[in-house]
Amino acid sequence: LFFMNEIVKRISNQIWFEKNDEERKILEYGLRITLSEFINNLIILIIAFITRSVLESILYVITFDFLRQYSGSYHAKTYISCGITYLVFYGVFLLLFFNILTVSHNIYSLLTCISILFLFLVIPVENKNHRLSNREFRIFQIKGYSTVILYLIILSISKLYNNWIIAKIISIVLIETMFSIILALFEVKLGGI
């Protein structure tokens, strides 16, 4: 964490010419998020190379991040806990994808159906740091619904053509997004985890 703050300060000092303190704080916040995402994705890429699952991991990251962008999900209090949470979700993905955690096809199907229904009932889930206006809420809801429908179509076509790799990735993403939202709802109910 210290090295990340130091890197962000150095970069903002290079970029910060005539910006006021508020603009500098916004710049530093954006740089922290970007650096944190870079580190998380670099770790995932290293693990993907080791497990020989680069393509699957890239598809997982893209689909998981894209859906969560509109559905909302759990937000950790620190960059480190956010990174750890994200890597835990990725680790569960790998365990499920490579059948290390064995789940029957019927359970996958059931959990996927439950997650789709759940997502339609609750998305978007707001973050305490960013409340959505009524207009934003509706836009995120429509985009979230559209993403879930798109994933459902991809899942159906993948199963129809026996592309179980894509089908499994989409199923896991839908299920993990549901659990991430459940975690977020518990966080709100309990006042923070």
Image: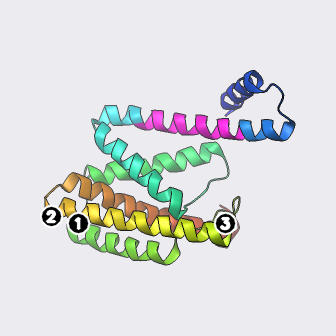
Residue indicated by mark 2? 160
Going from the N terminus, do you reach mark 3 or mark 1 first?
3
Q: Is residue 55 visible?
A: yes
Question: Which mark is on residue 132?
Answer: 3
Q: Which residues are magenta?
A: 28-44
* Mark 2, other Cα within 10 Å: few <14 / some 14–19 / many ≥20: few
Q: Main structural element of the magenta stretch: helix, strand or loop?
A: helix
Q: Judge whether residue 37 is colored magenta.
A: yes
CB under 8 Å between discs 2 and 1? yes
Q: How many marks?
A: 3
The percent position of residue 181, horizontal first and vertical second, equals 52, 66
The percent position of residue 176, horizontal first and vertical second, equals 42, 60
What residue appears at the point 25 percent right and 53 percent down from the top-left corner? 166
Q: Amino acid at mark 2?
A: Leu
Find residue 27 and report its image quarter.
Answer: top right
Residue indicated by mark 1? 156
Q: Amino acid at mark 1?
A: Ser
